Amino acid sequence: METAEFLEILDREGRLLAAAATDAGLDAPVPTCPGWQVRDLLRHTGTIHRWAAGVVADAETSPRPVPEPPDIDGTELTDWYTDGHRRLVGTLGAAPRDVTCWTFHPAPVSSPLAFWLRRQAHETTVHRYDAEAARGGPATRVGTGFAVDGIDELLRGFHARSRSRVRSEHPRVLAVRTVDTDAAWTVRLSERPPVTELGAPQDATAELAGPADQLYLALWNRAPVPKVIGDPELAGLWLTNSGI
């Protein structure tokens, strides 16, 4: 996907999140994030938006810790979230294409700016889904191409990091496959972080499959996996330990 597409999605998803949060109310529980209310969702997402904007705006080349969310509530909180989202969209939209800054996972991208556009588009989309779950009613559908991209970022980015908790005492192979596109991944599990390759494996002992938009939400721990084939223990290992 192009960086302009990610920026457009980030803008739209952030506004949808704000609208759903307003409709739900700050006291509403967030069923996809047990223990959270909508106010926690806004504090978290707004903090991440400001953190990411700061990394790019300051061309920060060292890891920058995520700050604590502010202790604010009510209209002040919703206005603070909206302002932070607008600031993030403006910062990423105006940043030099060749800006050099820190990134935090190894998924292949064309530039640090592309990393942050992609990361924040998916961050905001997942939390927009959370806000709509708190509101109730139908959720906005995730586009197929964007869903495939988000699965790829999760598998080849987040779970390539040393902090991934998906480990297996014995080497095993998990397949991840979308049924409405030709996208597929081979996830090799061991005592080390998972190693993911593009393409369907020949030696998988379990497979997680489904339409791209549903599989995206499932792998981000927001919905059940549409279809599990093969060894249920291996599929369960992934789903239990893969939370970000």
Image (tube, rainbow, N blue to C red):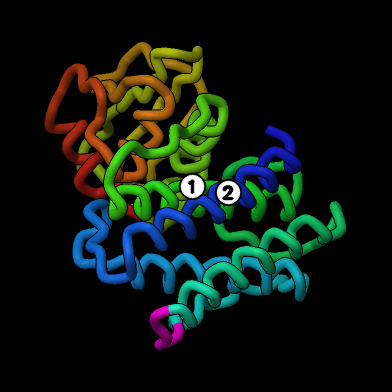
At 26% from the left edge and 38% from the top edge, which residue is drawn?
A: 223
Left or right relative to 155: residue 4: right
Left or right relative to 162: residue 111: right
Left or right relative to 232: residue 221: right
Question: Residue at the bottom extreme?
Answer: 71
Q: Position of residue 197 (x, y in %)?
A: 49, 28
> Is any part of residue 80 visible from this angle?
yes
Q: Position of residue 213 (x, y in %)?
A: 42, 29
**Quarter location, residue 41:** bottom left
Q: Is residue 220 magenta?
A: no
User: 28 or 191, which lies in front?
Assistant: 28
Numbered circle sitting on residue 203? none
Left or right relative to 127: residue 153: right
Q: Position of residue 215 (x, y in %)?
A: 36, 29
- The kind of residue tagged 1 is Thr
Quadrant location of the C terminus in the rendered image: bottom left
At 50% from the left edge and 13% from the top edge, which residue is drawn?
A: 182
> Is any part of residue 166 visible from this angle?
no
Residue under numbered circle 2: 121
Quadrant location of the N terminus in the rendered image: top right
Residue under numbered circle 1: 125
Label 2 near label 1: C-beta < 8 Å?
yes
Measured along the vertical axis of the image, is residue 187 above or below residue 132? above
- The kind of residue tagged 2 is Ala
Q: Secondary structure at mark 1?
A: helix
Q: Which residues are magenta?
A: 70-74
Q: Secondary structure at mark 2?
A: helix
At 62% from the left edge and 66% from the top edge, which residue is drawn?
A: 52
**Tally of numbered discs:** 2
At 19% from the left edge and 32% from the top edge, which residue is drawn?
A: 234
User: 106 or 5, which lies in front?
Assistant: 5
- Mark 1 residue crowding within 10 angstroms, few (<14) / some (14–19) / many (20+): many
